[in-house]
Structures are given as structure tokens and as C-alpha cells.
Image (cartoon, rainbow, N blue to C red):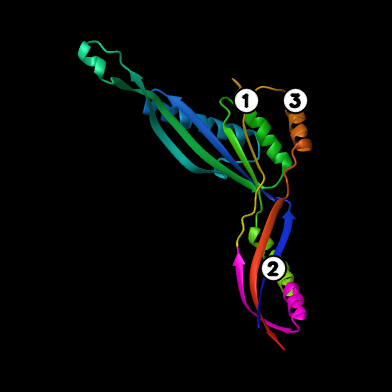
Amino acid sequence: MQIFVKGEAHREFAPDQIIASVNFNTHAASYDEALQKGVERVKEYLQFIADNTDFTFEDFKTSTYNIHEEFHTNRIDPKTEADLSKNLTKRVSDGFFFTQYAALEFEFNKERLAKLLVLTSKTDGAPRFHINFTLKDPKSCERDLLADAFKDAKLKAETLASAAGKHLRDCVRVDIDMPPHHEPMYEGTMMRKSAFRGSANEIEEEIRNIDDTFRPDDIPVHKIINCIWETAD
């Protein structure tokens, strides 16, 4: 007789890594102008962050870069009787849009994150932020859960075997399901400022406020395995 059981394990882990995605957007009338303005904005922001934090240019990795033109359609009023039965329209350019995404990964540190957020809010044309709190080594967490899930499966198999008057022998097959784990996220658009402003004391106070109140959730990780056990009389 064979016994089919499902073993499950669940734990929550404190995040130990931060991935900050920085989104730069610029609009201009021409391709060249959008490119120039976009590149200048990115360089100015990265230089400002490098000058005021321990992050460097090289820490920001470009993940997406795009310049595209967008259009809208205007309706044209008929000028002749023949035009009345026609759907007259004109395609009009809305200009060129520059987009660049840069990713910044660093070990979980609320003070570094708070300083990055505060200083970003002080820059001209502050970019959009999307922050993921993640696990630096999720495989290690999953290995621990696999052992727990196997123990859970074995306990269930022993219970079923005993109820059937059998002795549990060997586990002859294990299938591992891969349910996703959910990472806490934060997304926000920084207030646009015309220039860097604020005294050192004001900046430090803002950093302390974020550091005191910004508490990401633990990351739940769930592991499921399906096992087949042999039994004997």
C-alpha cells in the first residue's frame, strides 16, 4: 500500500535587502531634446546622491531605457459639402517621452534608505520610487522550509499508516511545489523642488522621522511538497 501526503511549512522572515527602482521621466518637443534633458536629469540626480550619500554612480544599474513619440488625433471640421460624409481627422504629435529605470540594491538599512528618500525629495524633478524589501538569499530560507515540510509530510504519513494498521517504510517520491513569496513594497512620487533646500538639522530630523516610522512587513515564505510513502503489514 502507498500513502500520498502533502507536507507544508510556513515561516516569515525579516527582509535583509532593499531594491529601489528609480524611474526618470522627461517630455520634450523633439527626440534630441528629450534625450538631452533626460540624460541631464539622470546625471544630476546620480551626482547629487553620490555627493551626499555613500552610494556611487556604479551602484545604480539601468534596467530599462526608452524614448518614444506619442500622438493624439484631432477632428477636422468639414469645409465642403463633400466633406460632411467623411470622418476627417489629423494625427498630431504630443512630443517625445524619455524614460529610464535604474535599480539600486543594498543590504537592509533603514538609515541609508531614509537618507536616500529624504535627499531624493530635495532634488529638482525628483524621480518616482518603487521599493521592494526582499531576501538576499531566498534559497537558504527555502532549504530550511523543505526540511520542515518533509517532517510535516512524514508525520501525516505515520498517522495514516497507523490508522490503516500498516508500518511506514520509505518515502519513494517527493514533488516540490513552488508557491511564490510576497515581498513588501513601497511606491511613491517625491515632491518636486526647484533646488536643494533645507538645513542640515532639518534633513537629519526628516531622516529620523522616516527611520522611526518606516517598518516593512516580514516576508512570508510557504513551501509545499507532495510525498509518496511505501508501507508494510
Give the camera-side residue of 76 and 162: 162
Image position, residue 29 (x, y; %): 39, 22
How far is the residue under mark 2 from the one under mark 3?
A: 53 Å
Hey, what amino acid is under mark 1?
Met
> Which image quadrant: the C terminus?
bottom right
Residue bounds of the magenta highlight: 155-177
Image position, residue 11 (x, y; %): 73, 58
How far is the residue under mark 2 from the one under mark 1?
A: 49 Å
* Image mark for residue 202: 3
Task: Label 3: state its secondary structure.
Answer: helix
How far is the residue under mark 3 from the one under mark 1?
A: 16 Å
Residue that label 1 marks: 191
Instruction: Please name the residue shown 77% across and 80% down the image.
Output: 162
Residue that label 2 marks: 7
Residue sitting at the far left? 82
Task: Label 2: state its secondary structure.
Answer: strand
The magenta stretch spans residue 169: yes
